Amino acid sequence: MTQLIAFIPFILMSIVFITHMKKEPRGMVTGVLFLIYLITIGATGLFTLFYYSEILQKSNLLYTLVIISGIIFIVAITLFPFVLIIIYFIQGILILKKEGLRLKNVLSLSFSIALIIYIFVWPLIMPLSSSNIYEKPLLLFADIIYKIFSFIFIYLLFLMAMYCVSAILNLIHIGKGKNLDYIIVLGAGIKGKRVTPLLASRIDKGIELLNYNPSAKLILSGGMGPGEDIPEGVAMADYAKQNGVSEEKIVIEDKSKNTYENLLFSSKLMDKENPKIALVTTSYHVFRALVFAKKLNIPCIGYGSKTKWYFTLNALIREYIGYLSISYRFHMLVILFYTIALLMFTLFDYLNKTGAINIRNFLHI
């Protein structure tokens, strides 16, 4: 009976997570719920191991496997920050080498350097709290600044992890035949009248989905930007026709200038009630596009096209920054709340240690 009770949180969390994924996965809540789900699975697993510990100890093979698994897990958690730094550093160098020195191409390298500074350098140059910190104003100020920036850094890292998890989960679909009515392919830059390899990859993915959903229509969305001779939607339609898509299957949207307008203007070209919609863009861009679609009350799922691997991590950081720009007010409030709470705690601690107030009397203990 005790063992069955231990499985209740896991069962409840499974129901919550699966229901959320079916109903509305387009948000950071998806990543948070998945994290809680993993914690629930881990807790249930640990309880099961403890419950059957006597049986495990009797089997040398099972006991050895459990110990090895635990060691691998601990080593993986310990090495994760270092692996992350190395991956982003190498990827940052590669993108600069292949794509050139531009502001948008230094994000990966900057991220890895920021991690190095925070993990290894900052603790050495920033003084930590000490018993006589209130006697040294500069030390106190440095300590407060260190705690605020540490919170901001850890908070942003947590958000980034939740963003990445949510983005990956929104790319997972079982089967491609979803009885779709419309497939929106989001535009990207073109050269003159020709689509770029990145945009061609998106259109190819849209055509692939169209083959699995023969009754759907392909909406090719993109206006005309600087250096382009025709609207992106027109160039995309030409490419699709050259690759076997009949003209009656194609709908052109040629007025939009950004992702928000891609979705807004494309939705106005749909003539079916309660249509089933899929949007197609580059994999790292799908989640932010889905967030825009959610804000526009456009029910849809997202599919990602492939891109150069060394470009993905850098672009993912750029997409994450773009997401923060959408929801920055909430995150600013979280940081402000923490700062106020820290200052109040510091003041209260200072008054208590200097004898200005007595914490026991204040709390009526």
Image (tube, rainbow, N blue to C red):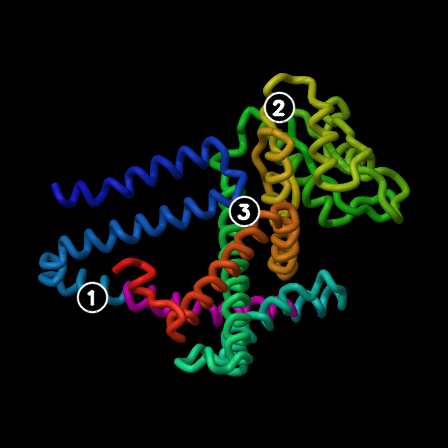
Near mark 2 (Cα within 10 A), the count class, few <14, some 14-19 or many ≥20, is some
What is the CA distance from the residue labelled 1 to the residue labelled 2?
54 Å
Label drawn at residue 64: 1
As drawn, is 136 to the left or to the right of 74?
right
> Which mark is first along the chain, 2 or 3?
3
Q: Residue at x 71, y 31 (%)?
A: 264
Q: Residue at x 51, y 46 (%)?
A: 166
Q: In which quadrant of the rendered view does residue 160 lie?
A: bottom right
What is the CA distance from the residue labelled 3 to the residue labelled 2?
23 Å
Q: Secondary structure at mark 3?
A: helix
As drawn, is 206 to the left or to the right of 29?
right
Q: Secondary structure at mark 2?
A: loop
> Which mark is first along the chain, 2 or 1?
1
Q: Nearer the viewer, residue 307 or 184?
A: 184
Near mark 1 (Cα within 10 A), the count class, few <14, some 14-19 or many ≥20, is few
Q: Nearer the viewer, mark 1 or mark 3?
A: 3
Q: Is residue 246 above or below residue 125?
A: above
> Which mark is first along the chain, 3 or 1?
1
What is the CA distance from the residue labelled 1 to the residue labelled 3?
36 Å
Q: Is residue 104 above or below residue 8?
A: below
Quadrant including the C terminus: bottom left
Q: Amino acid at mark 3?
A: Ala
- Per the rendered image, the range of residues in magenta is 69-92
Label drawn at residue 167: 3
Residue under label 2:
181
Q: Where residue 172 sits: x, y (%)?
A: 50, 42
Label drawn at residue 198: none
Q: Where residue 65 sits: x, y (%)?
A: 23, 63
